Image (cartoon, rainbow, N blue to C red):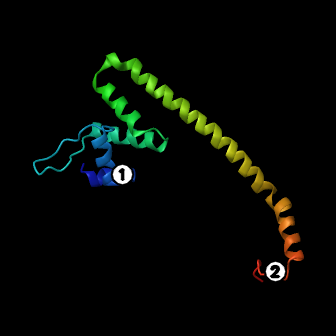
Amino acid sequence: MNIKNVSEKFKITTDTIRYWESEGAIPKIPRDSNGYRQFEDVDIEWVEFTNNMRKSGVSIQSIAQYLKLFKHGDNTFEERKEILKSELLQIENKLNELTQTYKQLKSLVERYDSVMGGCEMSLKLQRKEDSYFIH
């Protein structure tokens, strides 16, 4: 599969894939006789892994460190696991923050008609002559 096909598959740019490769977040991709990248299944799996990690906020440096350790084999198992555990903890913290924000916004939307709608109507009636409102 070529870089264009891979970029379309994951809805990312070809520049993003090239950047990930240059930073070590995906392995060096084999080239054909014309110098074009030819992605094998294992390469596509690394692109998918990196794409998912990036969507979750994992840094390029952490992904590259993970890949570097992965290439060194089973003796880096614990180090790789620690990277993943650390990233998981950070994602959990973000999820907790997002959950709190979600609850606040949901509550505000649910109360908006009764609380804010009434306030806005009152303001409109009091300031009918102001140019703030389009009639």
> Mark 2 highlights which residue?
130
Tell me where residue 62 appears, x and y as whole percent: 41, 33
Work out which residue is located at the far top of the displayed protein and give it.
Answer: 75
Asked whether, in this view, residue 88 is left or right of residue 114, the answer is: left
Mark 1 and mark 2 in contact? Answer it, CB < 8 Å.
Answer: no
Residue at 38 percent of width and 52 percent of height = 12
For residue 125, which quarter of the picture?
bottom right
Tell me where residue 64 appears, x and y as whole percent: 35, 34
User: With respect to residue 65, does 21 lie above or below?
Assistant: below
Tell me where residue 75 appears, x and y as whole percent: 32, 16
Residue at 40 percent of width and 43 percent of height = 51
For the C terminus, the image quarter is bottom right
Tell me where residue 82 appears, x and y as whole percent: 45, 23
Work out which residue is located at the far front of the displayed protein and give it.
Answer: 130
Which tag is nearer the camera, tag 1 or tag 2?
Answer: 2
Residue at 36 percent of width and 30 percent of height = 65
Q: Secondary structure at mark 1?
A: helix
Q: Secondary structure at mark 2?
A: loop
User: With respect to residue 109, does 77 lie above or below?
Assistant: above
> Mark 1 highlights which residue?
9
Task: Report how many numbered discs are placed on residues in the image.
Answer: 2
* Depth order, front residue of 8/102: 102
Residue at 31 percent of width and 29 percent of height = 68
- How many neighbours does mark 1 have within 10 angstroms: few (below 14), some (14-19), or many (20 or more)? few
Asked whether, in this view, residue 85 is left or right of residue 34, the answer is: right
- How many neighbours does mark 2 have within 10 angstroms: few (below 14), some (14-19), or many (20 or more)? few
Amino acid tagged 2: Asp
